[in-house]
């Protein structure tokens, strides 16, 4: 699980940098805190599925693109906001 979190965090970080975004900007767009973005990018804490969806939407990437590994489909279903 730790490798998955670090891999996902690196992909989020790389995409954010590719878009010339700060953590604060990404947090605003995803409606989360900058701390959430920071801990996700560092792979320190798993994000809730609905948070992953918000971050991926803000980065204009699919949830599959945020991780190299196969993620169980139930983690990617849309949750009501």
Image (spheres, helix red, strand yellow):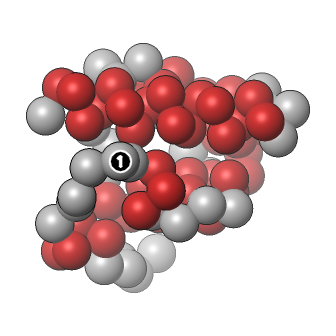
Q: Nearer the viewer, residue 59 or 81?
A: 59
Total tally of numbered discs in the picture:
1
Q: Nearer the viewer, residue 19 or 28?
A: 19
Q: Is residue 43 above or below residue 52?
A: above
Where residue 49 sits in the image (x, y, percent)?
A: 31, 60
Where residue 79 sits in the image (x, y, percent)?
A: 35, 77
Q: Is residue 60 left or right of residue 62?
A: right
Where residue 66 sits in the image (x, y, percent)?
A: 46, 50
Q: What residue is shown at x 25% (from left), y 36% (from top)? A: 4
Q: Nearer the viewer, residue 1 or 35?
A: 1
Which residue in the protein does label 1 denote? 68
Residue at the farthest right position:
20
Q: Nearer the viewer, residue 73 or 69?
A: 69
Quarter of the N terminus within the rendering: top left
Q: What residue is shown at x 52% (from left), y 37% (from top)? A: 11
Q: What residue is shown at x 70% (from left), y 36% (from top)? A: 16
């Amino acid at each position: 699980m730790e490798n998955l979190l670090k891999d996902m965090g690196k992909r989020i970080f790389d995409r954010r940098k590719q878009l010339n975004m700060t953590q604060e900007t990404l947090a605003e767009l995803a409606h989360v805190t900058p701390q959430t973005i920071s801990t996700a990018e560092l792979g320190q804490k798993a994000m809730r599925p609905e948070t992953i969806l918000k971050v991926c939407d803000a980065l204009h990437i699919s949830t599959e693109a945020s991780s190299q590994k196969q993620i169980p489909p139930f983690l990617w279903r849309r949750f009501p906001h």
